[in-house]
Amino acid sequence: MLKLVKSDGLPASAATVGRRLDRWLSTLPGARSFVRSGVQIVNSPFAKARLNTVLASTERPVWLEIGGHTPRERWVVTNVNAVTRLYLDATRRWPLEDGSVEYLYSDNVIEHLTLAAGRAMLREARRCMIPGGAIRIVTPDLRTHVDMYLHGAESLSNDVAAHYRDIGLDVEHPVDLVRIPVASFGHHAGYIYDFETLAAELKNAGFHDPVRCAPGQSAHSALSGLELRTHEGPAQLAVEASA
């Protein structure tokens, strides 16, 4: 039975409900997509309204996260998943005025979007950001994965290959190190980047001075230490640009 309350009788958090829902659905083959779609249909209008309320009371400029899961102090953390508390479809017009966002952070989202949808998200980000604001986009780095493939069998023993095995993926041949970022996690329906491509798209959206950053590191204190995937090292591409 799926429990949606804590032992003290209070409602469980959205994140907790989401984890319990995933575990419960894993026992019901074929039901996951159907049930999560139903939950999303019910939750999304409330989560959209809640976001509007939060944004109306949030001091400007806003620090906005796209595709986040964990609340962060000072940040407005949004998502589009079935149980998100604050729903924001970043590919459509955001419920924010021009020049109202100082920092924008998005980790492993843009690769799930088509090129056109990713461009729409970056244009909205630029519209909403104040001059001098900073955006940080984190996404799998296709060039790094191709380089690992070209290095052959020696790459099968590196930390990235070990991480993929730890999460249940098959890594038996060097080609798997290219196959995974392209074909796994739903990325086949989106668009995969290297630094040059993401930098060009950021410039096209109106940002300038894109730079590659080490995982978890930034010249902006607000954007430092945010990543959850630092153990993946160069497999993850972190790019910052200025508005």
Image (spheres, helix red, strand yellow):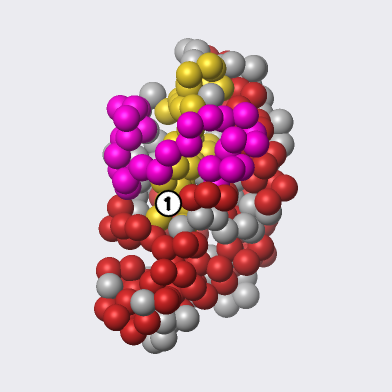
Count of numbered circles in the view: 1
In depth, the one of 138 and 32 nearer the eye is: 138
In depth, the one of 154 and 63 nearer the eye is: 154
- Is 66 covered by the magenta stretch? no
In depth, the one of 241 and 2 nearer the eye is: 241
227 is higher (above) or lower (below) than 71: below
189 is higher (above) or lower (below) than 86: below
In depth, the one of 180 and 151 nearer the eye is: 151
Q: Amino acid at mark 1?
A: Leu
Give the residues drawn in magenta, as a range: 198-224
- Residue at 51% from the left image edge and 55% from the top image edge: 194
- Is 201 covered by the magenta stretch? yes
170 is higher (above) or lower (below) than 207: below
- Residue at 53% from the left image edge and 24% from the top image edge: 243
Give the side of residue 52 with respect to residue 220, left or right. Answer: right
Give coordinates of residue 22: x percent, y percent: 48, 62
Q: Is residue 83 visible?
A: no
Mark 1: which secondary structure? strand
Give the side of residue 126 with respect to residue 13, left or right. Answer: right
Q: Is residue 118 visible?
A: yes
Give coordinates of residue 105: x percent, y percent: 46, 36
- Residue at 41% from the left image edge and 86% from the top image edge: 173
78 is higher (above) or lower (below) than 131: below
Give the side of residue 110 with respect to residue 134, left or right. Answer: right
Q: Which residue is mark 1?
A: 237
Give coordinates of residue 110: x percent, y percent: 57, 49
Give coordinates of residue 186: x percent, y percent: 59, 64
The local crowd at label 1, few if under 14, some if 14 to 19, many if 20 or more residues have their Cα within 10 Å, is many
- Residue at 64% from the left image edge and 58% from the top image edge: 190
